[in-house]
Amino acid sequence: MMFSKILIANRGEIAVRIIRACKEMGISTVAVFSEADRDAFHVVLADESYCIGPHASTDSYLNMSAIITAAVTSGAQAIHPGYGFLSENTKFARLCEKCNIKFIGPKADVIDIMGDKDSARRTMKKAGVPVIPGTDILQNVVEAKKAANAMGYPVLLKARSGGGGKGIRLVENESQIENAYNMASAEAFASFSDGALYMEKFLFPVKHIEAQILCDKFGNAVCLGERECSVQRRNQKLIEESPSPAVTEKQRKEIIAISRKAALACGYVNAGTIEFLMDKDGKFYFMEMNTRLQVEHGVTEMVTGIDIVKWQIRIAAGTKLSFTQADVMLEGSSIECRINAENPKANFRPSAGRVELLHFPAGPSVRIDSALYQKYSVPPFYDSMIAKILVHARTREEAIRKMRAALCELVIEGIDHNAEFLLEILSMKDFEKGSYTVDLLNKK
């Protein structure tokens, strides 16, 4: 039976995105907010709203008991965690289950397996999915040095838990490893309360390719094609597109087959993303799985016509997928740019403050995902992403031109943002050719 009321345990543009999907499905919505977000757009848009604590995330958007209390008080039957915050927190998923509230995502046991990158690597390897050469969990610096010497530099030290580029360090020689190990472990512990690290061979140059999957509880697994996410700064994505300009139809079929195999191997149910690295020879290696909605899900929606958020909700309610792999067709090209409140000319210094003037671009096949409105004050306490601009066109060349036009039309006065920086990237020859790799911005 479909839910009649859903609580959205998030903020900003993703909370707005989920609320809109719920409204289109005839589902009542409950927003939660910190004191800093009292005037936020998602609070106004929802049918009900509850303050869950002060501005600090640890006291509000990560406050499990406050969120569960809001869900119980409001009568919400399910919680959608969005991305970030509690979206991959197994303790929260289990708490929801204990309180008879549906967590819109995979089961906690699956999050445990795939959220632990070391466990995920072993699971995929056992299933026959190609993985990047690497180690199990490292116990100390001495073991890390021994492994790196055996593997050959350069190597990557990577946190077992979390994401968003936290707890990752490139090590190019033995003199760097002790400092890199200590810094990566400390950062991982501060971000995820887990300082465990493992090591992978550093593949270079590579493309970051990810596959979107939807799986229901009836054993049906569908892959909605791939996204190219190689435009990154400090391991944070800036521009994504679907399909990848570098993936051939033969490779796409391979990615789809591998992704479905990976999802079925871990008993996955709901939406998820399998992330791969593609080397210069066109070979794919499993990197990790994100057991949640991705920021860049919109480009996949635009080329497939499938609403991923609505299907997350339907699957959580027990609905069977109404389409098969053969029904999935990628039409045209879609590009997404992340608009961040930061100043690229001042070492990407975060920007907060009042939006004095706001104009978003519009036109056929131009989509804006944002929680901004004129006179809104952007708080300094959260992630710097304030909007996503997505475009869709018949060809990649048209999509690039459309995105350039959209970025030129964007007006946000009162705070700094990165639109000009994104325009520079779109004009880089490697981007235009589609040959860019994850080191693209190192060439600027």
Image (cartoon, rainbow, N blue to C red):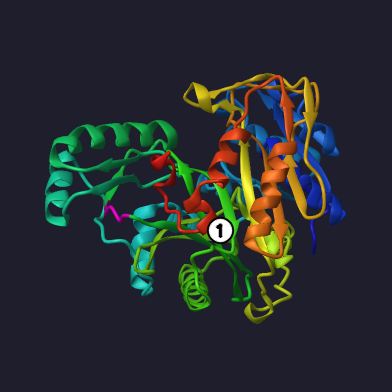
Q: Could you tell me if residue 104 is visible in this image?
A: no
Q: Could you tell me if residue 157 is visible in this image?
A: yes
User: Residue 262: percent from the left, percent from the top?
Assistant: 46, 70
Above or below for 316 versus 231? below
Please indicate whether residue 250 sits to the left or right of residue 277 in the image. Answer: right
What residue do we see at 88% from left, 54% from top? Answer: 26
Amino acid residing under circle 1: Lys
Above or below for 322 versus 151? below
Res 181 → quadrant: top left
Please indicate whether residue 299 sits to the left or right of residue 84 in the image. Answer: right
In magenta, the rendered stretch is 200-204
Q: Quadrant where the N terminus lies?
A: bottom right
What residue do we see at 79% from left, 44% from top? Answer: 75
What residue do we see at 51% from left, 77% from top? Answer: 253
Above or below for 352 versus 3? above
Q: Residue furthest bottom?
A: 326
User: Residue 135: percent from the left, percent from the top?
Assistant: 24, 56
Please indicate whether residue 266 sits to the left or right of residue 11 in the image. Answer: left
Above or below for 162 versus 384? below
Local SS, label 1: loop
Residue with the mark numbered 1: 107
Label the magenta part by its dominant secondary structure.
loop
- The one of 264 and 67 positioned closer to us in this rendering: 264
What residue do we see at 43% from left, 34% from top? Answer: 191
Please indicate whether residue 241 sits to the left or right of residue 359 in the image. Answer: left
